Image (cartoon, helix red, strand yellow):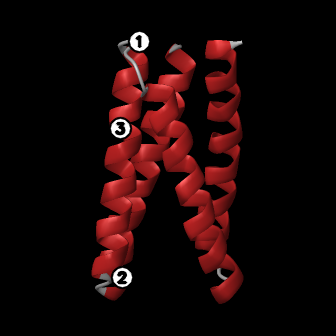
């Protein structure tokens, strides 16, 4: 599942860097905390997937689902492109990992 781990690591990097940029631009501590938290969860899931350990795909699925919901609500409220892009990325990664999760058991 090398490709699955790569996606998780990429999402982790995007979220972490986005949180740091959000903090640097507007001193938004919630952006920093959320970005680093989501980034860490994606990085952990990427590690678990790369080592073929339990719960890596499940963690990535849940994390991307929460990212989609959180950023989707913010995108609708603010109409800004960054939350909309993160919501779209969360939706796509959620669909990918949900498919992987399903394939593990069926």
Label located before the other in sequence (3 or 1)? 3
Q: Are marks 3 and 1 in contact (CB under 8 Å)?
A: no
Q: Position of residue 95 (x, y in %)?
A: 71, 39
Compared with residue 14, is residue 76 higher up or lower down, i.e. above or below?
Answer: below
Q: Nearer the viewer, residue 35 or 81?
A: 35
| Residue beneath disc 1 | 52
Query: Dot 3 lies on which element?
Result: helix
**Disc 3 versus disc 2: nearer the observer:** 3
User: Along the horizontal axis of the image, is 106 left or right of 74?
Assistant: right
Q: Nearer the viewer, residue 63 or 17?
A: 63
Q: Quadrant of residue 35?
A: bottom left
Residue located 39% across and 54% down the image: 38
**Disc 1 versus disc 2: nearer the observer:** 1
How far is the residue under mark 3 from the one under mark 1?
14 Å
Residue extending farthest front? 105
Q: Position of residue 50 (x, y in %)?
A: 40, 17
Compared with residue 2, is residue 64 higher up or lower down, i.e. above or below?
Answer: below
How far is the residue under mark 3 from the one under mark 2?
24 Å
Residue located 51% across and 28% down the image: 57
Q: Nearer the viewer, residue 72 or 14?
A: 72
Q: How many marks?
A: 3
**Disc 3 versus disc 1: nearer the observer:** 1
| Residue beneath disc 2 | 25
How far is the residue under mark 1 from the one under mark 2?
38 Å
Residue located 53% across and 33% down the image: 7
Q: Position of residue 94 (x, y in %)?
A: 64, 43
Residue located 68% across and 51% down the image: 91
Q: Are marks 3 and 2 in contact (CB under 8 Å)?
A: no
* Disc number for residue 43: 3
Crowding near the residue tagged with mark 2, few <14, some 14–19, many ≥20 C-alpha atoms within 10 Å:
few
């Amino acid at each position: 599942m090398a490709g699955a781990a790569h996606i998780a690591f990429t999402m982790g990097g995007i979220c972490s860097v986005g949180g740091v940029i959000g903090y640097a631009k507007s001193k938004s501590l919630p952006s920093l905390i959320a970005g680093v938290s989501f980034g860490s969860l994606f990085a952990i899931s990427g590690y678990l997937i790369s080592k073929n350990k339990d719960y890596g795909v499940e963690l990535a699925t849940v994390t991307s689902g929460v990212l989609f919901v959180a950023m989707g609500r913010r995108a609708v409220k603010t109409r800004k492109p960054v939350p909309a892009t993160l919501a779209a990325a969360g939706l796509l990664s959620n669909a990918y990992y949900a498919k992987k999760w399903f394939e593990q058991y069926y």
